Image (cartoon, grey):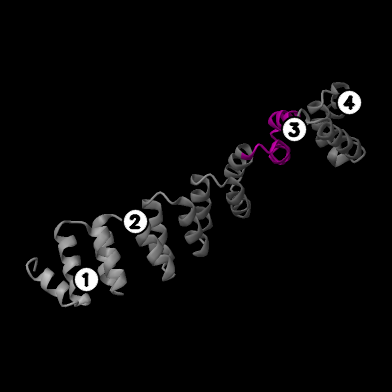
Amino acid sequence: MTRRFPLWKELKRKDRILLCEISLLENEERYAEAAGLWVKQKRFDRAVENWKKAKAYSELGSYYFKLRSYSLAGENFVAAGQFLDAALCYKRLKQLKRAAEYYVAGGEYATALPLYIRLKAWNEVIVCYTALGDHYQLGVLYEKRKEYKQAIQEFSLYANGSNTQKRQLRDEAKEMEGVSRSMIRAGIRYAAILQHREAAALFFS
């Protein structure tokens, strides 16, 4: 085959030249390069064979994604460490938990957050809010879980962010303290902004 290659080139038999070049690349185990040439020939089956041998997971992921074979695309994107691409695949498959996990793996906490909320996976929601530094939403979530100490801590961190945020918590507390079912929530906010007398009055009323 090698001896015939110059002759084909001289005869400008481009198709045979290309096939010969592919054969040489495969013999040298340069599978990724061979796959690229198979793509030019539109022989995607042979390209896939070579990508697999080359462990070219990114290329395999992209190929399967174009075919809308999202499960195979996702598997290969994960193997390639392309977690955000994998997350998109699993989101299209409506596998929201896996999609959210790979968004987190890719550092996209803001994108994972609504998926975890939809799944009611509250521990994971806490992880996302923590990564995003959203102390207010953490306070609200801990409050709903009746983890009041943690709620006070998070609202306190929120209040320390600016005078405007501290004033917001004070205004919320004033509004809530007049409603019996919201008295604990008001007390939590007063405690967070160090108005302990007001907090105590609500907690022990």
Q: Are marks 2 and 4 in contact (CB under 8 Å)?
A: no
Residue, disc 1: 18
Say which of marks 1 and 4 sits in front. 1
Residue type, label 4: Glu
Residue, disc 4: 198
Left or right, residue 18 beside residue 187: left
Q: Gap in Å between the C-alphas at discs 2 and 1? A: 24 Å
> Which residue corresponds to the image point at 19% horizontal and 76% vertical from the top-left?
12
Q: Is residue 187 magenta?
A: no
Residue type, label 2: Tyr
Crowding at label 2, few (<14), some or many (≥20) Cα neighbours within 10 Å? many
Residue, disc 2: 57
Q: Gap in Å between the C-alphas at discs 1 and 4? A: 83 Å
**Residue 188: x %, y % from top left:** 79, 31
Say which of marks 3 and 4 sits in front. 3
Which quarter shows the C terminus?
Answer: top right
Main secondary-structure element of the magenta-colored stretch: helix
Q: Earlier in the sequence, mark 3 or mark 1?
A: 1
- Residue extent of the magenta highlight: 132-158
> Which residue corresponds to the image point at 49% horizontal and 64% vertical from the top-left?
93
Q: Gap in Å between the C-alphas at discs 3 and 4? A: 19 Å
Say which of marks 2 and 3 sits in front. 2
Residue type, label 1: Leu
Q: Which mark is residue 158?
A: 3
Q: Are marks 3 and 1 in contact (CB under 8 Å)?
A: no
Residue type, label 3: Tyr
Q: Tell me the SS state at disc 3.
A: helix
Q: Earlier in the sequence, mark 2 or mark 4?
A: 2
